[in-house]
Image (cartoon, rainbow, N blue to C red):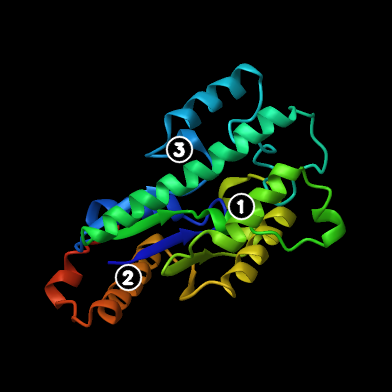
Amino acid sequence: MYTVALIGGDGAGKTTIADQLRDSFPLPLKYLYMGINIESSNVALPTSRIIEKLKKQKNVSPTGDAPPSTSLHNRPQKRKPAGKVWATIRLCNRIAEELYRQVLSWNYRRKGFIVLYDRYFTFDFASFEPAEVYRQRPWDDRIHRWFLANHYPHPDMTIFLYAPPEVLYARKGEASIEYLDNLQQTYLKQGERSPNFIVVDATQPLEKVYEDVCNHLFRFYEERSGKPVAEQTRRESGKFVA
């Protein structure tokens, strides 16, 4: 089958839509969380769970990065040195975790499933900041971002749930309008590098957003398989359940 990433800022409804697809989408579908929060992930390497516990004991954010209000895109340029050994271990585990999820994805596709990604690493870690600013990032962060940008596979299709930053902020009250705007601009720029990048209006009612997402999934299935989706199958996608 194929892979599809569902991305968007906090408040866009991506997890809500992903949950509905898991429950109601009529074509064979598997879900994979592809974000940085290990606690939210439905799969993870044992080493990732261990590292998360160690970070909690040290009172460090579970993601190893800045708090949600600043995010990966606006994280402080300096951090407390963790030591070269610890940084190397964390970098190797992070890349291993991301490759592990790709192996799972490949296995699902081989079995005939559409693989739905909730978030995606190449979008979360995309960087378009000036070179002089980028060089101030820790060395392991730069290597990790280079790996994702140059060697991590793109989803076959990406659906970006877009709403103006003011709308997202009003919905969840997290981060800041400036941050949300920068984040979405980063997604759009990264989308120029990604095949089949689709923007869905997330200011619509969730029922309409869900319908639009389903229609894109059906259309892409028809393009990839060469088989039409029966009208009965489309109806089986069901109505959105709030």
Mark 3 sits on what residue? 40
Percent position of residue 161, x then y: 50, 64
**What numbered label is drawn on residue 217?**
2
User: Which is more N-terminal, label 3 or label 2?
Assistant: 3
Contact between labelled residues 3 and 1, with CB atoms less than 8 Å apart: no
Instruction: Specify the quadrant that holds the N terminus.
Output: bottom left
Report how far apart the C-alphas of labels 1 and 2 lie in the structure: 29 Å
Q: Is residue 83 above or below residue 218?
A: above
Percent position of residue 146, x then y: 66, 56
**What numbered label is drawn on residue 185?**
none
Is residue 160 found left or right of 57 in the rendered image? Answer: left
Mark 1 sits on what residue? 170
Q: Quadrant of residue 127?
A: bottom right
Tag 2, which secondary structure?
A: helix
User: Which is more N-terminal, label 3 or label 1?
Assistant: 3
Q: Is residue 178 above or below residue 211?
A: above
Tag 3, which secondary structure?
A: helix
- Disc 1 packing (10 Å; few <14; some 14–19; many ≥20): few
User: Which is more N-terminal, label 2 or label 1?
Assistant: 1
Q: Nearer the viewer, residue 208 or 218?
A: 218
